[in-house]
Amino acid sequence: MAQSARRRGPRLYLGAVAAGESGYFVLLAPLLPRLARSDHLSTREVGLLVAAYPVGMLVSSGVAGKLAGRWGARPVTIVALVMLTASSLLFGFADNFSLLMTARVLQGLGASAAWAGIVTWVVAGTPRAEQARVLGWIFGMAFAGTVVGPGVGGLASATSQRLIFILLAGVCAAAAVVTPRSAGAGIKDHTEEEDGGESIFRGIWASGLVLILMGVTSGLINAFGPLRLTNDHVSTFGIAAVFAVAYGAQVIVSPLIGSIADRYGPRNLAAGIALAGAASLILVTLTSSPIPTAAAITLSYLLILALWTPGALIVNARFAANPGTRAGAMNSAWAVGVVMGGVIWPHTGLSPQGAIAYLLAAALLAALGLSCQWRIRARARQRYLT
């Protein structure tokens, strides 16, 4: 009982850190109209500002993972919170594009370090049989942050950007001060040589495909979904509800998937979710009135986001001997997908109201599901032969 209580405290703390990091990622959207107007940002600059956060995560994920492996989870988590504190202050006082970009990249760097600390902490301090369930719960908390984040950004836009980001900096600084101590947080990873010397970026393409395609296909919903909903006469409130429901559902779905993955394996779940997501995207092309369109896009986005937990668990299994490297690979795969998704769909020249973009995304998810099934059967056949 006492051991369970000792684990519960750090897990609650890590869940709060995950929620805060995810909130930082999504709070920018409600601020963009105000920033574009007050700081005279061009469309290109707005796009770069949106991409700055995942780019910051991408370029630092490998380093953050290695540091978490060498130093342990607690020091890296503290560094992450210090970086988020500094970036919040910079963003609050920024009055031009260069400072805003610097702040968002720094937030991405801090986010990468935060996830390196979270994953290393969980893996080092949790029995192997419970890791998928605990990570699933933490991912659910992260999605809870994505529900709250837009409200914080909207509050900053409606009141004082400077005041809100000063308060956020204070919260991050306080979190750094009260970082708990636990046995798991101090355990270091194996060295890279002990892990076979496999680099993060070689392993991503072998294990991170689920997260990459999640980012690419979610980019379709982010870029084209609101325009399709508007074209089918869905109100602004309805559009907000679509995204809020899809994100909010992950608070329940992610822990559930984590628990199921402990029994059936993450690839089986990824295959089923990807194939269901492909079917739901095809359904989007068949709708043309407000309620069916909103329901189809909500379901599609919910299923695409649900790929996060099995995708992260697949990456974690690839780097089983090195928790810090797990976090770096997970962040890198997700960031690659988000950046690709943000770039590809707006530049395809396809109509947001047409069916082709949704059918292409459905084909990607279907290929992903079939690929996961093929890998499962290939490994089963190999085990049988040996």
Image (cartoon, rainbow, N blue to C red):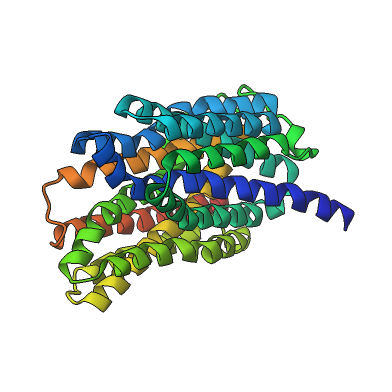
The answer to whether residue 237 is above or below residue 58 is: below
The quadrant in which residue 209 appears is top left
Most distant residue in the top direction: 193
Estimate the x, y position of residue 77 in percent, counting from the top left.
Answer: 64, 34
Residue located 19% across and 73% down the image: 286
Q: Nearer the viewer, residue 380 or 255?
A: 255
Residue located 73% across and 46% down the image: 10
Residue located 14% across and 62% down the image: 353
Estimate the x, y position of residue 234 in percent, counting from the top left.
Answer: 23, 71
Judge whether residue 272 can be spotted in this image.
Answer: yes
On the picture, is 292 further left or further right than 203?
left
Residue located 57% across and 55% down the image: 141
The quadrant in which residue 261 appears is bottom right
Q: Nearer the viewer, residue 14 or 58?
A: 14
Q: Nearer the viewer, residue 142 or 368?
A: 142
The image quadrant where one finds the N terminus is bottom right
Estimate the x, y position of residue 339 in percent, counting from the top left.
Answer: 32, 39
Estimate the x, y position of residue 166 in percent, counting from the top left.
Answer: 53, 37
